[in-house]
Each structure stands twice: as structure tokens, then as C-alpha cells.
Amino acid sequence: MSVDKSSASELQNLLPIVETFHSVQGEGAWVGANAFFIRLALCDVGCPWCDTKISWSDKRHPRHGVADLVAEAQSCHPRFVVITGGEPLMHDLSELTEALRQAGLRVHLETSGAHPLTGRFDWITLSPKMFKPPVAEIYAHVHELKVVISQSEDFAWAEEQSAKTPESVVRYLQPEWTSAEGQKLVFDYVLAHPQWRISLQTHKLLGVR
């Protein structure tokens, strides 16, 4: 049985979406900026502190076409679009990012780097995890490094990851949200290591998405 090429192309354009929403960027270098978020389903990293475990599987999430996602993003007039997850690089992001850019939208990526990079981005935030380390080729492309800290042992991982990134990369340590110890550790570490900055999840402090 032959498949109509246009129908096959349409099926390929569909992506499993946990949610889309218009808010401000809550973390890192672009904190407080007007952003439209596209949260893709699927993740195989498995962080124990993950606050979006609903995104780990793609089975219960609706699939959206690229054109619809671009139209929704455009309607919000954001400063940029953030593609996040889950782990967004488990999907081929080439078509989505190209369509967003052709629509005049700046495109950001939030990733653990555990899968090969696809798509074109104006800003890439790498948040590496020990459970499934980044692929080697991604380090040269990142603009921002954000390492979650919950215990003192995490700093060695942070420094190891920092050493693999270009000098121009902005480096953040982010306390694990539920860890009071992590907050104190990060505060003291940044005071002793000025190449790092503190990243806080300000959207949680504000009580917004």
C-alpha cells in the first residue's frame, strides 16, 4: 500500500506536546524576559528531583503540527521561544526551529545534551546530568551552562562540565529547589569561585509557570 507523500510529511511534522504557555523565563541569563514555551514529551535522563516527570513518556500527550505551534507562538509576541522538555533533543528539531526562525522568532533550547543536536538556535542552555552525560559534540555550541546542585559532591561535576565549554559560556549553579543545603552550598561556592553565578527558579518564587 502506497502512502501519499503529503500525508507522510504531515505525520512527520507532529510532535508530542506536554504543554505550551506564555510566561517569563524564570532561570539563567534571560531571567524575567517575555517567553513562549514549547514543552516536548519524552525523556530518558531520569533526574530524581525532576518537577516535570509527566514529560518522561510521550504516550498520553497530544501531537501538534509545526505550523500550529508556530502560529500559537507568534500570537503571543514573545521575545523568544523556548523549546524544553522532557529532553527535547530526543526529537529532530530541524523543521520546528526552521519554521520558528522563518516566522521571525528567536529560538532558545534547554537541554541536558544527552542526545545529538538538531535544529538551529539563537541560544542553547546546557543543563548536564550525571545520570546520562552530554554527547561530546554539544559543548562547542552552548551559550549557557546550568548545573543543578543538591550536595557538595555536585561541584566536581559542575567543574568538569565547565572545563568542556568555551570561555564565553555563562556559568550558573542552580540549587535543587527542595534542598536548603543546596542553596547554602551554592551561595558559599559562588563567593569563592567568581566564574560562577547563582541561578534561582524565580518563576516558582513568583508562583507562575
Image (cartoon, helix red, strand yellow):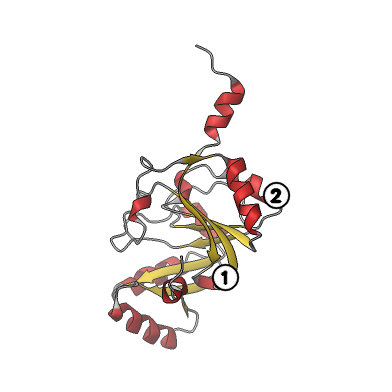
Relative image position of residue 24 (x, y in whole percent): 54, 68
Relative image position of residue 47 (x, y in whole percent): 32, 59
* Residue occupying image coordinates x 55% and y 25%: 8
* Residue occupying image coordinates x 46% and y 65%: 209
Quadrant of residue 94 in the image? Answer: top right
| Circle 1 crowding by C-alpha within 10 Å: few under 14, some 14–19, many from 20 | few
Q: Say which residue label 2 marks.
A: 103
Tell me, yes or no, if residue 86 can be seen here.
Answer: yes
Relative image position of residue 64 (x, y in whole percent): 52, 41
* Residue occupying image coordinates x 67% and y 55%: 105
Query: Is mark 1 in CB contact (under 8 Å) with mark 2?
Result: no
Kind of residue at disc 1: Trp
Q: Earlier in the sequence, mark 1 or mark 2?
A: 1
| Element assignment for label 1 | helix
Report the side of 157 relative to 162 (left or right): left
Q: Residue furthest top?
A: 1
Q: Say which residue label 1 marks.
A: 30
Report the side of 190 relative to 32 (left or right): left
| Element assignment for label 2 | loop
Task: Check the image and report above or below for 162 versus 63.
Answer: below
Residue 191, numbered circle? none
Foreground of the two, 2 or 73: 73
Tell me, yes or no, if residue 95 can be seen here.
Answer: no
| Circle 2 crowding by C-alpha within 10 Å: few under 14, some 14–19, many from 20 | few
Relative image position of residue 178 (x, y in whole percent): 30, 73
* Residue occupying image coordinates x 51% and y 59%: 139
Task: Check the image and report above or below for 182 versus 75.
Answer: below
Kind of residue at disc 2: Ala
Disc nearest the viewer among 1 and 2: 2
